[in-house]
Image (cartoon, helix red, strand yellow):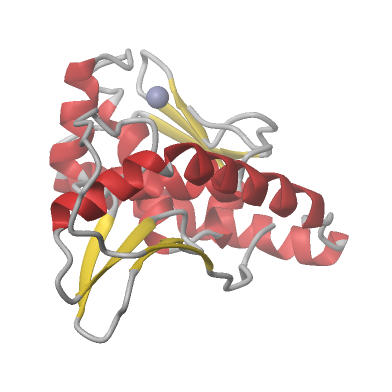
Amino acid sequence: MQPSLPFEIIERTSAPSSAAPALQHRSTTSTVAPVFVRHPRARRYLLRVTDDGGVRVTIPRGGSKREAAAFVERERTWIEEELLRRQREHAQHREALPTDVERELRARAKRELPPRLFELAASHGLKVSRVSVRNQRWRWGSCSRSGHICLNWRLVAMPDHIRDYVMIHELMHLRRMDHSRKFWLLVAAACPDFQSARAWLRTFQCTAPRC
Ligand SMILES: [Zn+2]
């Protein structure tokens, strides 16, 4: 499982320059959208990959968001390597749970996950025909055409917003069974923060599944 994650900040810095390098306005879909924060006492741009898999850039006094964005672009490879490195590190450190702990978590999952799923379904006007809590090896959840949703018991140990994202993802499959753009628009409407949840799953649960 992965309850407490080490809080670790890795930084890259860049001095503000008057002669900004040529900017490339590429889309940044390969990783998370960076969060820009102005800091009047900062002397240089500071790039961090945060413990939840986000990217945070500090803009120093006299700096610009434009230059900060260019900095992120230049360091794109480093960011991706850093995310991967953390994935690997996290996977290595993940240990099997003692059986009694696992048994307790699975029992709690059976009690707590279905009611939450029904609650979310109701709030989106959706009908789930059946829900099962399973020990899926390679998936967080699944949804059949008949409206049967399976949930991985491990969701019970994740932060609430991550668990909710996975449930909403499966629920939106009741409207669309694919992963098309239209599907993701449905997810985004129901769960505006879904990108950060996906990044969290990618970063910290790499050996485990996605839907
Ligand atoms: Zn899916």
Q: Which of 61 and 167 is in front in this view?
A: 61
Classify 201 as above or below 98.
above
Classify 129 as above or below 61.
above
Q: Residue at x 66, y 46 (%)?
A: 85
Q: Which of 77 and 209 is in front in this view?
A: 77
**What x and y, as percent, mark residue 94?**
77, 55
- The answer to which quarter of the image holds residue 173 is top left
Q: Nearer the viewer, residue 111 or 79?
A: 79
Q: Which residue is drawn at 17% across and 30% down?
A: 186
**What x and y, as percent, mark residue 70?**
26, 44
**What x and y, as percent, mark residue 91?**
74, 48
Q: Nearer the viewer, residue 17 or 108?
A: 17
**What x and y, as percent, mark residue 64?**
14, 60
Q: Residue at x 70, y 32 (%)?
A: 137
Q: Residue most toward the front?
A: 19
111 vs 174, left or right, is: right
Quadrant of the displayed image that contains ligand 1: top left
- The answer to which quarter of the image holds residue 93 is bottom right
Q: In which quarter of the image is the N terminus?
A: bottom right
How many numbered callouts? 0
72 vs 2, left or right, is: left
Is residue 122 visible from the viewing direction of this image? yes
Is residue 115 visible from the viewing direction of this image? no
